[in-house]
Image (cartoon, grey):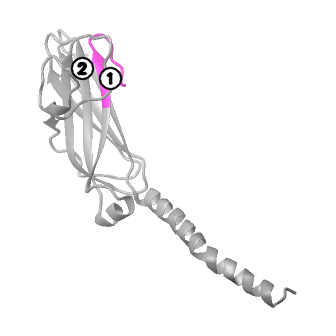
Amino acid sequence: MPGPDGGSQWLEVVRAFAPLVVAFFAGVFSVWLFRVTAPVLSLGVEGQWVGERADVLLLRLTIENRSRVVSTLGECRVRVLEHHYQAMLSEWVPFEEATVKPAEAPAKWVAPHRVENPPEHVYPGEKVTIELLRSLPNTQLVHVGFQISQRLGRWRLRLAGQPIMFRNTATAWIARGIERAA
């Protein structure tokens, strides 16, 4: 049985560390809650040259919801940039003309295209495929970027500390004669 000083010291130690323990478990709970309620999308881009002269590019854009909650989609944009073969090209696709790296300037600048009638919601486990045709005669190398804006609810914003629109992007290099997603 502890003496009078031993018992009071024990209570002081518990009182000093109790807020830290509560804060730690509240943080763990917040992270768990966000992971359970945050939408997680997986995007994909595949391309295939089709047509009599293989001058039409068939793009397959996929959206897969890998979370446990319904994802509300905002704007869907596709960027198709024609390039010349160069020694070094990155995976990054610029969606704004001001952000183009000088060493990776495309052969021709084309504004991003909005995907018409994208799905408004993607349900958990659902995979949506959108197919687009682009006529690109005399093009050997194409850099494709697919970007989706997700709308997060106000309570998710407070948990995540993120802006109201969260963007996901997927890219692919497609060369004539080589169809491979990046």
Quadrant of residue 162 in the image? bottom left
Label 2, secondary structure: give it: helix
The percent coordinates of residue 38 (x first, y second) are 39, 56
The percent coordinates of residue 39 (x first, y second) are 37, 53
Mark carried by residue 90: 1
Which badge, 1 or 2, comes first in the chain's sequence? 1
**Amino acid at pointer 2:** Glu
Q: Are marks 1 and 2 in contact (CB under 8 Å)?
A: yes
Depth check, front residue: 28 or 125: 28
- Residue hosting label 2: 104
Depth check, front residue: 74 or 54: 74
In magenta stretch: residue 176: yes
Q: What stretch is highlighted in magenta?
A: 171-182
**Residue at (48%, 60%) from the top-left corner?**
31
The percent coordinates of residue 120 (x first, y second) are 23, 52
Determine whether, in the image, residue 57 is placed left or right of residue 18: left
